[in-house]
Image (cartoon, grey):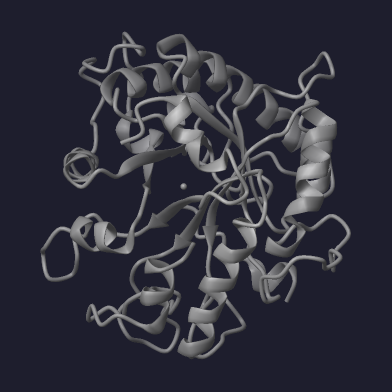
Amino acid sequence: MTLAIALAASAAVASASRDAGHAKISSARAPVAKLIWGPVTLPNGKSAFPTYHKLGVNVFEIDLDWATTAPTRPSNPQDPNDPAYQWPAELNVALSQAARYGISICLLVQKTPTWANGGRSSDWEPTDPADYANFLIAASRRYPAVRHWMIWGEPNRDGNFEPMPVNSSVGPRAYALLLNAAYHALKQVSKANIVIGGDTWSFGTVEPADFLRWMRLPDGKPPPLDDYGHNPFSRRFPQAGQQPYFPGGRDIDDLATLEAQLVKTYHRRVPEWLSEFTISSNHTNYAFSFDVSREQQAKWVTAAFSLVNSYNFVAGLGWFELLDQPPGRNALTNGLETWALAPKPAFSAYEHAR
């Protein structure tokens, strides 16, 4: 998955229908969907889904890597049974466990096979967006219980999606073509599929405000989507009423500003799918140059959910992620539990978040 964790360098997400997927946003008083990233299997070999169930998770988010699933070009790319496809076994386990515990699955589909992008690295856009669209058709047929589909992750920063020249319309326009193809492909399989596009993060090589402004098709229209995905990482404690501290940046305190731009762009309210949010506890690490205490981390969890539940346009808020990494000086410490499966204060905060 996209760790969304260049924040230090830039500023110092089973529902069976679209209605079910958006029931959480019908009222500002109704809790948003609780999303989470984390393992399918815990370090002790047991399923992680009883833990997700205890936490009240609504949607479990997981990657579907196009490059490793289709290492060679399929002869019948819309057929999930084409022998070229190597569907991940872990995803089968996740789907089975999620269904058992009444949890939906959201798939983040990214990474281009070399055969689809002229032999470049997997972060490069496909030469023909139809190849990505065909893969999504096959995937949606393979996994009919999945309704939430994220189209790439954090494409507004280089290293995740290329081309992405700094402060240029080139990358957003390339992404718009990919999202357009993906949207029509997924809707072709099922109108109930919820297509989550944009999937930006707080800052980036192209900041979110510019990415959304430049995310246009050749006719000048924005590409179709159901929800707008965004990872609103922040150094600032979650609370409303603050001004963006980077003009084009959009952290968790800038969600209303982001929504205003979305309404202006799409001429409707656009639900925000906040796939990833987090804060490190106890020490800095290879990804975050800032941290808070474990007690403060729990307060961030409570405040973040309280904030998004004060709006009527947020579809869900995701925590990245369930577990800390194994202990080490540079290990990520943004989990709700330690690697040894000891709940941190943030665990209870997430469990009781409303």
Q: Is residue 13 left or right of residue 156?
A: left
Q: In which quarter of the image is residue 335?
A: bottom left
**Does the image show residue 43?**
yes
Establish if 279 lies above or below 200.
below
Residue 91 in picture, x, y percent from top left: 24, 41
Q: Which of 227 and 27 is in front in this view?
A: 27
Q: Is residue 80 left or right of residue 24?
A: left
**Does the image show residue 206?**
no
Q: Which of 185 and 19 is in front in this view?
A: 19
Residue at screen point 32% across, 77% down: 337
Establish if 326 lies above or below 144.
below
Residue 258 in picture, x, y percent from top left: 77, 48
Residue 103 in picture, x, y percent from top left: 29, 45
Residue 149 in picture, x, y percent from top left: 46, 33
Q: Nearer the viewer, residue 333 or 272?
A: 272
Q: How many marks?
A: 0
Q: Which of 36 and 132 is in front in this view?
A: 36
Q: Quadrant of residue 15?
A: top left
Residue at screen point 32% across, 63% down: 55
Residue at screen point 51% across, 77% down: 286
Q: In this view, does 100 lie to the left or right of 243?
A: left
Establish if 125 lies above or below 321.
above
Residue at screen point 34% across, 40% down: 105
Establish if 32 lies above or below 301.
above
